[in-house]
Image (spheres, grey):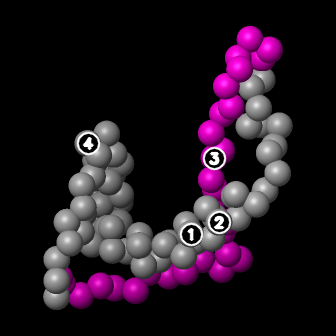
Amino acid sequence: MTQTRIVLNPKYKPKAEEILEATGIDNLSQLFTLLLVNYGDCLVNCLKHSHQLPIQSSLVAQTPTQNTLQPPSIKPQLSPQAKKFAPMGSF
């Protein structure tokens, strides 16, 4: 197996640690792998479709003094039946 390293922004480490504790996943490498395998396609589809949507009023500044657009929030659509995680072997 080849190795690839990723860099986790320090401001997201508490969230990652929270997920590890809540799920029982052993380490950040396994967490990233599970997220990539289980949600990678959903992320790509959401990003592709978000560019095709018309600009919504929520993206436009709410007050006349604010002249900046708010970034869109991307929310993955959940399938009617959630996927179950398969146990992973040791790396």
Quarter occupied by the C terminus: bottom left
How far across and how far down the image is residue 31, in percent?
31, 67
> Which residue bears the numbered disc 4?
10
Q: Quadrant of residue 36?
A: bottom left
Q: Tell me the CA gap for discs 4 and 3.
A: 22 Å
In the picture, the disc for residue 73 is 3
Quarter occupied by the N terminus: bottom left
Residue at x 70% of width, y 17% of height: 66
Which of label 4 and label 2 is nearer to you? 2
Between residue 16 and residue 48, name the one nearer to us: 48
**Is the C-beta separation of discs 4 and 2 under 8 Å?**
no
In the rendered structure, which amino acid carries the disc numbered 4? Pro
How far across and how far down the image is residue 10, in percent?
26, 42
**Is the C-beta separation of discs 2 and 1 under 8 Å?**
yes
Q: Quadrant of residue 70?
A: top right
Q: Tell me the CA gap for discs 4 and 2.
A: 28 Å
Marks 4 and 2, the one that precedes in the sequence: 4
Residues shaded magenta: 63-91
Residue at x 67% of width, y 75% of height: 79
Q: Tell me the CA gap for discs 3 and 1.
A: 14 Å
Which of label 1 and label 4 is nearer to you? 1
In the picture, the disc for residue 65 is none
